[in-house]
Amino acid sequence: MKLSTRTRYAIRAVLELADKYGKGPLQTRIIARQQDISVKYLEQIMAALKSAGLIKSQRGAKGGYMLSKPPDKVKISDVFEVFEGPVMTVECVSNENYCARAAECIARRVWSEVQSAIKNVLQSMTLQDILDKAKKANNGNYQI
């Protein structure tokens, strides 16, 4: 499984917002510069995140974007699913009727375990968890 660039950039953008949580909104151009993402591309990503309710915007000279919830309440799976949809390794794991062999297929069991493992990791990690691990691992010096 390979993540799309949109997903990777979205996670970096929300981590940037999480890192500055409670300090007011961040402008797109600042996030774009910090993350080396084109402003135009980031605007599309931010629109999708806003539409999903993960971020909110504030208009005006001091406007920008901020998380809708505290970083410890936003799971990586929330961001992932906006751009990738639900975690799915193969169709038959979610829909046994997709394949006549599904009930007896030993490979399906492997894909099911892989899918569960990915889901568990994405659902167990919050933005705050990632920031805390980075701070601890790098003595407070980290780059998002």
Image (cartoon, rainbow, N blue to C red):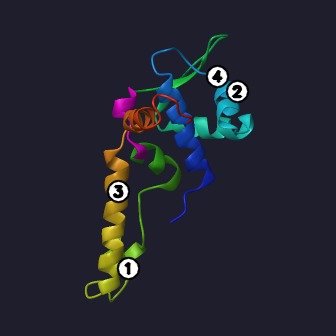
The residue labelled by disc 2 is 29
Q: Specify which label sits upstream in the sequence, 1 or 4.
A: 4
Q: Is residue 62 above or below residue 103?
A: above
The alpha-carbon separation of the residues under discs 2 and 3 comes to 32 Å
Q: Specify which label sits upstream in the sequence, 2 or 1.
A: 2
The quarter of the image holding the C terminus is top right
Q: Position of residue 74 (x, y in %)?
A: 38, 36
Query: What's drawn in magenta, residue-wise?
Result: 70-76
Which circle, 3 or 1, is nearer the viewer? 3
Q: Going 69% across and 39% down the picture, which residue do you hit?
A: 37
Single out the residue that lies furthest toward the left: 103
Q: Going 31% across and 63% down the picture, which residue do you hit?
A: 116
Badge 4 vs badge 3, beta-carbon distance below 8 Å: no
Q: Residues within 10 Å of mark 2 (few under 14, many from 20)?
A: some
The residue labelled by disc 1 is 98
Q: Going 49% across and 47% down the picture, which residue do you hit?
A: 82
Q: Specify which label sits upstream in the sequence, 3 or 1.
A: 1
Let me know if residue 1 appears in the view. Answer: yes
Q: Amino acid at mark 3?
A: Lys
Instruction: Give left or right: position of 124 versus 38.
Output: left
